[in-house]
Amino acid sequence: MSLAIAALITGLAICVGQYFIWIYAPVEQVMGLVQKIFYIHMPMAVWAMLSFFVVFVFSALYLIKRDIKFDYIAGAAAEIGVVFSGLALITGSLWGRAAWNVWWTWDPRLTTTLIMWFVYAAYLVLRTSPMSAERRSLVCAVLGIVAFVDVPLVFYSARLWRSVHPAVLGAKGGGMEPEMLTTLIVNVCAFGLLWLILLTVRFRQTRLAGKLDARLVWDNE
């Protein structure tokens, strides 16, 4: 399947997801329409954490194999994870303003997520640091592994400490109606396709940039 066709399918999936959000899913009785932000917020958070898991896995693979393609994949996943987690923080703040009457609260889930965002943003800064390509990849791989420590804390923070943030993936499914759960699953899948497309495109761009840099170094020598 070509990338263009995959992108078209992804666009259609996102449109279907929006239909489920605004037409199919019922309006929540207490919060009203603003609750529908949840169907965008949750998939963003899910795929952000999966992005950072990919960073962890491919950073470890780079240390073992020393294959530069693993470093490229880790870097691409980190970029998407920072964007998605940033959007999750923004949409969560909008949702929280309606639910808790504040834009931000130092809740364990929110605090650990913000820390996670800063750590991986620093990882991206490190990837642009002025050092040799091999050394930069090595240092980034180590940070990509160490940084993952915060990701399980984000996931379990609402269970480990007292948190106003709802535990959606609880034993009772967070108390959602079947239509709400279906809408959530559809949008998690749709954003998953978007995540995969972005990862593929960014990996290809990074690989081509690496080949170009190597060619320029070779020509200068």
Image (cartoon, rainbow, N blue to C red):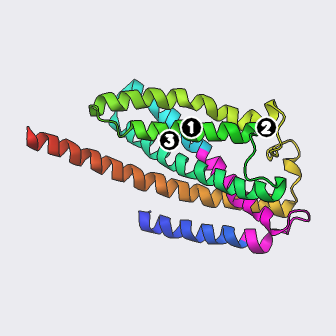
As drawn, the label of residue 158 is: 2
Between the C-alphas of marks 3 and 1, the distance is: 15 Å
The residue identified by callout 3 is 121
- In the rendered image of this protein, does residue 66 appear above or below residue 117? above
As drawn, the label of residue 79 is: none
- In the rendered image of this protein, does residue 156 appear above or below residue 26? above
Q: Residue 215, located in which quarter of the rendered image?
A: top left
Q: Residue at x 8, y 37 (%)?
A: 221
Residues in magenta? 20-48
- In the rendered image of this protein, does residue 194 appear above or below residue 136? below
**Residue 87, percent across and down?**
61, 54
SS under mark 1 = helix
Q: Residues within 10 Å of mark 1 (few under 14, many from 20)?
A: many
Question: Counting residues from the N terminus, which is met first, the one under dot 3 or under dot 1?
Answer: 1
Question: Counting residues from the N terminus, which is met first, the one under dot 3 or under dot 2?
Answer: 3
SS under mark 2 = helix
Question: Counting residues from the N terminus, which is met first, the one under dot 1 or under dot 2?
Answer: 1
The residue identified by callout 1 is 53
- Visible residue check, residue 149: yes
Q: Residues within 10 Å of mark 2 (few under 14, many from 20)?
A: some
Q: Amino acid at mark 3?
A: Ala
**Residue 95, percent across and down?**
75, 57
**Residue 180, percent across and down?**
82, 61
